[in-house]
Image: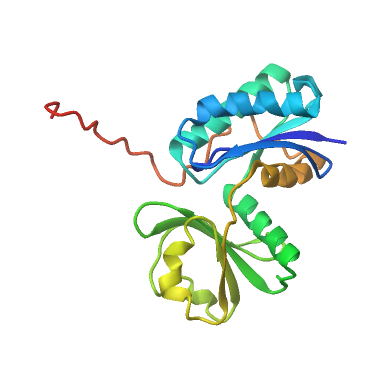
Amino acid sequence: MALILGIETATSICSVALVRDGKLLAIRESVGARDHSAALTTYIAELFTEAGLTFQQVDAIAVSMGPGSYTGLRIGVSSAKGLCYALDKPFIAIDTLKSLAWQAVQNCKQLGKDTENVLLVPMLDARRMEVYTAVFDQNLQVIEPVNAHIITENSFEVFARKEIIYFGDGAFKCKSFFESKDNYAFLDNIDLSAFAICMLAETDYKNHNFADVAYCEPFYLKDFIAGKPRVKGLY
């Protein structure tokens, strides 16, 4: 009966959850949070109070590893590592886009939509017409690995004869190009959540697929570029 704490901060969503054997015990999340570092600590403390559990009862800590926001990923991964060190618990790293695909599959099941032979394309919004994306099958096996993709009318044409479902906060960039295609569909309101992180982490926990706390780093996909401060008279 594994108790897993999940952390999701790869985007503007800050989400934490406690899950035991597939059952959600408690969850806290906010959309558009600017200060993940402050919210995360509070949310985690509230989870354990609500569930009536102690930190030492956790069996593993799972975190969204990217791609995503540089700052958000640093906060989430650093917090997870700190807890793992302090509590001497296993560290589980979860692919952010895979967790989003898992949620899409659950959504399709709830809506009675068949995902047999359907390709799943999660998208996280990057700058301009760019998205972080990957392609999965209905079993969450990778068909096309994670990449930074600039959306054009020719995007994903290699899969043109397949049924494809697009979702995530970057999928809106495709609609003007793809919405006229009968074999392409869009799922709305599929957002990142720590619940998905926990659910995927359960398999890793059973298989003892743990990441190295000391050396595991977030998957940024692209190098961080610091902007110049816009202070009048400074430059």
Give above or below for 207 relative to 186: above
Q: Residue at x 75, y 34 (%)?
A: 4
Q: Is residue 131 above or below residue 183?
A: above
Colour scheme employed for the rendering of this structure: rainbow
Please provide percent x and percent y for residue 124.
Answer: 49, 53
> Could you tell me residue 96's position as x and y percent?
58, 47
Residue 149 visible to an observer of this rendering = yes
Quarter of image, res 116: bottom right
Answer with the quarter of the image where residue 136 lies. bottom right
- The residue located at (36%, 60%) in the rendering is 129
Q: Out of 128 and 81, give the one closest to the viewer.
A: 128
- Between 48 and 150, the one lying in front of the other is 48
- Residue at 64% of width from left, 31% of height from top? 212
For residue 186, side relative to residue 206 (left or right): left
- Which quadrant does the N terminus fall into? top right
Say if residue 214 shows up in the picture: no
Residue 201 spot, x, y in % from top left: 73, 42
Q: State whether residue 72 is above or below residue 151.
A: above
- Residue 118 versus residue 209: which sits nearer the camera? 118
* Quadrant showing the C terminus: top left
Say which residue appears at 69% left-offset and 37% top-offset: 27
Asked whether, in this view, residue 173 is left or right of residue 30, the answer is: left
Q: Residue furthest top?
A: 86
